[in-house]
Image: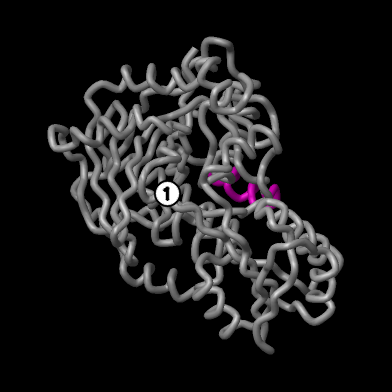
Amino acid sequence: MSYIKIPKILLPKNISYEKWATVACDQFCAEPAYWNELENFVGDSPSTLRLTLAEIYLEQNQKERIESIQKHMKTYVESGLFSEYEGFILVERRVGNDIRVGLIISFDLDAYDWRRLPVPIRATEETIIDRLPPRVEIRRGAPIELPHVLLLADDCKKEIIEPIYEKRNTLEKLYDFELSMHGGRITAYKVDNSEALIEKFSALLNPKTQIEKYGQNIGILLAVGDGNHSVASAKVLWEETKKSLTDAERANHPARFFLAEVVNLYGGGMEFEPIHRVVFGADEKFIEGLKGRLSGKGKVKLLTKSGTIYMDAPERQSESIRAIQEYIEEAVKENKSLKIEYVHNECRLQDVLTEFGGVGIVMPKFPNSDLFNFVVNVGNLPKKAFSIGEPEHKRYYIEAKRIK
């Protein structure tokens, strides 16, 4: 049985792609200036900015925003904005000197779970359950999905995506343009033989291959590297939807298969970057409490209005990340005046602290090579443990797929 399906992908036609594509909704959550500039750039043009709920607005007129998103989706679909392409898409993303190559596919949500279960497609981080309801509600009334998900393939021999990329000049281009807001350039190509690629993906599940990589046959095919909450939301609604379907209807229902981009864990442009924490309202009591929870031969850096503080911490990055996140969540639960936000890039962290105050925690960097074995042998990393590249490297919403 294959857990990967050839999708029917919707792409807009006769519009400005630069204004259509917008960055993942969970980026720049502490930087309203980014979204204001993007709003001014897009203007009245058709845009995925109208089809997604940026998390910076989660607590602002949420009901009205969700209704507007669903309305725009239906309008775009009914107006004939999209053309449909059946097949995988090869994507080349350039940001500065980095090149990341991916393959847009769809995968079976029945093969995925965000909890620590032995399923073929697994989460890499803990899910923030509170962030699911708005996404589920959007999807409930949506005719299409526009995911920003990156799936990771553990293909150290580079046998799946890289050979196609080497032949990209023989493939037909679907789009090629500069992304807005310093997102770099993106180019997409039609893939000629998608069926052959499904066989290559399936080979990752070969028991011998699994034992060589992980010491046992644990049946892992892919891991969600970015967009854990988008996939989890789709899973929640699919579990709800399929209860009213017959077996025949479930087999090929469009909501069962989720659109995503697969990238090779060992490919270029795949540097894992830490996601830093800023705790608004934190004081000396918070800092001393954190200091009491951390110990070890490692170090963690805090940024405060009084200067920089270095604390002892576990040497293993995953242990530091887990201990810090657990302490923050406990502190926020006990003190309702505290608020946590997640910020990419230490320079941006400093900018946020300068403008809004709070305590910044510079998180340790998690190594790429440890990811699959950690997920297999230990479990999910704490929420927001790493990011694939800086915020500008995040996947932009471009492609869509019908879910009804």
Q: Residue furthest left?
A: 170
Between 249 and 38, the one lying in front of the other is: 38
- Circle 1 crowding by C-alpha within 10 Å: few under 14, some 14–19, many from 20: many
Figure coloring:
one colour
Q: Is residue 129 magenta?
A: yes
- Residue at x 19% of width, y 36% of height: 168
Is the stretch drawn in magenta largely helix, strand or loop? helix
Percent across and percent down for residue 183 are: 33, 61
| Magenta region, residue range | 128-138
Please state the total of marks drawn on the protein image.
1
- Residue at x 27% of width, y 44% of height: 12
Q: Quadrant of residue 394?
A: bottom left
Percent across and percent down for residue 268 are: 36, 47
Between 372 and 338, the one lying in front of the other is: 372
Between 138 and 4, the one lying in front of the other is: 4
For the question of whether residue 104 can be seen, the reply is yes
181 above or below 208? below
Q: Is residue 391 magenta?
A: no
The residue at which mark 1 appears reads as 270
